[in-house]
Structure formats: C-alpha cells, structure tokens
Amino acid sequence: ADGIRPEFRPQALTWTIELYWIYCYIHGKYLHRKEPFKLIAAQQELFHAHLTILHALNPDISFDWWPILSNNLVDNQHRRLLLSYFGNGDWQVIRDGLEL
C-alpha cells in the first residue's frame, strides 16, 4: 500500500483562495519588515496554495509529491509562475552558488 494520501476537497477551495490572499498580505508585511525567513515561509504557503488551486483545475491528476504533481499540472506559463517562488531554478546557477 502506498499509504494515505490527501485528497482534493472542492469544499476547501474557497478557503485555499482566501488563504492565498491572506499570505499575499503577510508577504507584503514581511517585505516591509525585512524578515527573510518569514518571507520564505510565506512564499512556501503561497506556493502550496497556488499548487492546490492548479490541482483543483485538474482533479483527474492524482495527488503526489509536489515536484511530480507540479510537472503533471503545469504548462510553460504555469511552470514559470511556480518556479518564481523559488528564485532562480537554473541548475547551473544553483550549482555555482553552492560552496564545494
């Protein structure tokens, strides 16, 4: 068995959209306060709300680990939007930024 997986609940969609806008407000507040770790946490919440909403538009795709789900849900435009939460997604830039 592959364990219990969360299921999409249409009745929670409105709350997910509201949560997205709450975190947009919170994100602005943390930007103003210059709190980088709280900004990152807010961006994670925005990302997961965004992914949940995209999944609601494609409920026939089974829930999976977010990188797999993301690849199954997005076209090029949505891919850029989702990647924007993580900054630069270019593997060479990431590699060059690592201290080896």
Image (cartoon, rainbow, N blue to C red):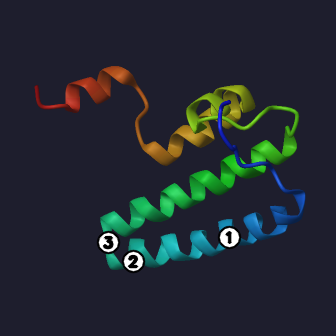
Q: CA distance from mark 2 to mark 3?
A: 8 Å
Three-letter residue code for mark 3: Glu
- Name the quadrant containing residue 23: bottom right
Q: Is residue 7 visible?
A: yes
Work out whether mark 3 precedes mark 1 in sequence or the reverse, and give the earlier one.
1
Q: Position of residue 34 (x, y in %)?
A: 31, 72
The residue pinned by badge 3 equals 35
Residue 79 in the figure: left or right of residue 57: left
Judged from this view, the residue extending furthest toward the front is 1
- Image quarter hosting the C terminus: top left
Count neighbours of disc 1 (C-alpha within 10 A) and say few if under 14, some if 14 to 19, many if 20 or more. Answer: some
> Image point 81% across, 50% down: which residue?
8
Q: Position of residue 52 (x, y in %)?
A: 72, 50
Relative to 77, does residue 25 appear above or below in the rendering? below
Q: Position of residue 68 (x, y in %)?
A: 61, 28
> Image point 58% across, 52% down: which residue?
47
Three-letter residue code for mark 1: Leu
Residue 23 in the figure: left or right of residue 61: left
Q: Secondary structure at mark 2?
A: helix
The residue pinned by badge 1 equals 19
Q: CA distance from mark 2 to mark 1?
A: 20 Å
